Image: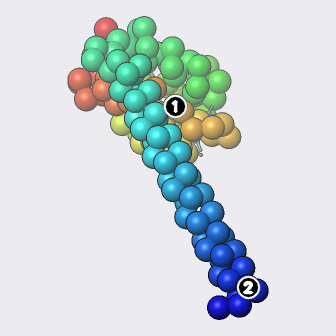
Amino acid sequence: MTAEKKQLTDSKLLNSSIFLCSFIMISLCWSSCQYANIQSITNTCDTSSVQFNKTIQPMMNNHCNSCHGGVSPSGGISLEGYNHVFTYGPAALHAMETGSMPQGAPKIDACSIALFKSWLDAGAPNN
Ligand code: HEC
């Protein structure tokens, strides 16, 4: 093998090692990020006993009732007060999960959605 040819093979080898290394690094970063996401939901999101007054109504007030409150709520859907949130609960959950609501705003965080779902699954108690 001539010196020139050998250099060429060496640099090809180097190139593919760099490629392989970057690939492995990116995969590692990605999987640890995924792991961190799952951890932050399971560690800090306590969905065991969600209360309407403490958690659900404030969530609606913060994220929804600028449009779904007052005398003429958007789409005729009020999310003010237990009876309304009870009635529209499943539709509200669906809208938050798909991200169609809150309209014109970023999707609600995963923990809030999990809290709302847990409250619904518990029979949507007025507590
Ligand atoms: C910026 C105003 C605005 C905000 C904030 C908002 N909505 Fe809406 N919402 C609307 C309008 C307008 C409609 C009726 C027209 C439509 O469906 O797009 C609507 C319709 C709905 C509907 C019925 C139709 C559907 O998409 O299912 C539900 C349920 C709903 N909203 C839930 C929510 C919930 C839950 C939140 C808070 C997480 C929220 N909305 C926040 C404006 C808003």
Q: Amino acid at mark 1?
A: Asp
Which image quarter has ligand 1?
top right
Return the residue found at the far front. Answer: 2
Question: Alpha-carbon neighbours of circle 2 within 10 Å: few (<14), some, or many (≥20)?
Answer: few
How many discs mark residues in the rendered view? 2
Q: Report the front residue among 19 and 62.
A: 19
Q: Report the front residue among 98 and 46.
A: 46
**Which residue is identified by label 1?**
109
Q: Position of residue 96 (x, y in %)?
A: 48, 38
Q: Residue at x 34, y 30 (%)?
A: 117
Question: Alpha-carbon neighbours of circle 1 within 10 Å: few (<14), some, or many (≥20)?
Answer: few
Q: Position of residue 124 (x, y in %)?
A: 29, 22
**Which residue is identified by label 2?**
3
Q: Residue at x 69, y 74 (%)?
A: 11
Determine which quarter of the picture holds residue 9: bottom right
Q: Amino acid at mark 2?
A: Ala
Q: Residue at x 43, y 14 (%)?
A: 55
Q: Report the front residue among 10 and 69.
A: 10
Nearest to N terminus: mark 1 or mark 2: 2
Mark yes or no: residue 49 visible: yes
Helix, strand or loop under label 2 = helix
Q: Report the front residue among 105 and 15.
A: 15
Q: Nearer the viewer, mark 1 or mark 2?
A: 2
Q: Residue at x 66, y 70 (%)?
A: 15
Helix, strand or loop under label 1 = loop
